[in-house]
Amino acid sequence: MLTVLHGESEFRRERELAELRISQDPEGLATVRFPRGTPIPTIMAAARTPGFFLDQRLVITECLLADHIRQQQLDPDLVHALATLPSGCHIISLEPPLPPAVLDRLRAALGDAVTFVDCNVPIGEKLIEWVTERARSYGVEIEPAAAEELVIAIDPTALQRRREHAGSQSDQQAGLDLARVDQELAKLATAVYPEKVIRVAVVRELVAADDAPLEWALIDALNRGDATAIVRELERALDTNAVPDVLLAQLASHFEALFAAQILPHLSPDAVAAATGLSARRIAQVRRILSTRSSMNAGAMLAALRAIDASLKRGIVIDSEAALAVTLLAGAQRVRPEIRRFER
């Protein structure tokens, strides 16, 4: 039998593995774990060795499948070895996201003898549901608004990015840190005792936002109208493996919040959030950033970023990096006259 724990979230993979180990070999007497890079014959030799204390042998591997994929095809020798495993052996393999063709090949070869467990970061409302279930594992409930507040505190664009890019390649490359979410839930569960309900207020009080994300250096350069810094920070972002459409979503999220915060300047963050559907935390966050942009200027920047996104999705624009650079430099030109008036 083969169980494949595949997906971008190491936290979910290890959680699923822990549950399987507890259910099948809680004492660890018939379990062996091999690190990535272990030769296939070594793994198969262990898989075919009967357990001393239990009927079933549990073998845990890392990237056994991912390391033997060539041109979207799985090594035929590995497929054969997995298809001829003895009935008393259970291999559990921890894997990154795998190509659909690989999953289909294993289904065809192993049939009911293979199980796939999705360990990706959940998307949209399912992410909120996952947070709710993790809170219950600590013996508390979390309000839906508080769950969303927690996610946004850790990654301000997580919910927006997942709704807009669900199923895309970038969606698999930029996952929310679920381990950090889990740590914060454990802290909050202790803090709210004995009430046992996590509310928005306690999340805002106790969960500190991460350091400014990568795109904030770009925002600072845009607010200064500094074309040289814009080019430098954009190159730095792309050189550190930032995905252009994810970076685009992050920038759009900032200017969407900035536009809402500026067009309704006398309302509280909660009131703006209720009127716009944005996060109150995000509204408060952008209000703390000194910006020389008017609401009209911020709105124009938001519209330009959304136009790029629409053009990319329709295939009108092919080079996302070039389109983003042109738009950001044009945004810098628009802000310079306002900076001069501000300085005088």
Image: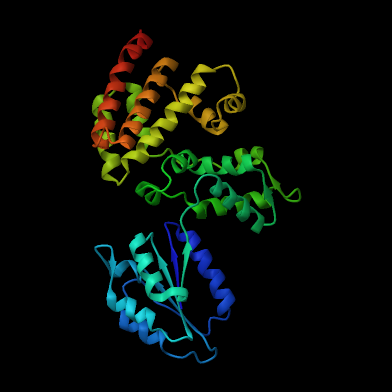
- Work out which quarter of the rendered image holds the C terminus and state it: top left
Quick one: 53 or 44, which is closer to the camera? 44
**Residue 75 x/y as whole percent:** 28, 73
Q: Position of residue 246 (x, y in %)?
A: 37, 40
Q: Is residue 187 left or right of residue 102?
A: right
Q: Is residue 152 above or below residue 35?
A: above
Locate residue 73: give its quadrant.
Answer: bottom left
Spot occupied by residue 309 in the image (x, y as percentages of width and height): 35, 33
Q: Position of residue 299 (x, y in %)?
A: 42, 20
Left or right of residue 74: residue 155:
right
Q: How many circles with numbers are drawn on the protein?
A: 0
Question: Left of 153 or right of it: where is 203?
Answer: right
In the displayed structure, would residue 163 be above or below residue 96? above
Q: What sort of colour scheme is used for the picture?
A: rainbow
Q: Nearer the viewer, residue 14 or 337?
A: 14
171 vs 314, nearest the viewer: 314
Residue at image location 55% in from the left, 33% down from the top: 281
Residue extending farthest right: 194
Kindly indicate the quadrant of the structure image that contains residue 100: bottom left
Residue located at (27% from left, 40% from top)? 236
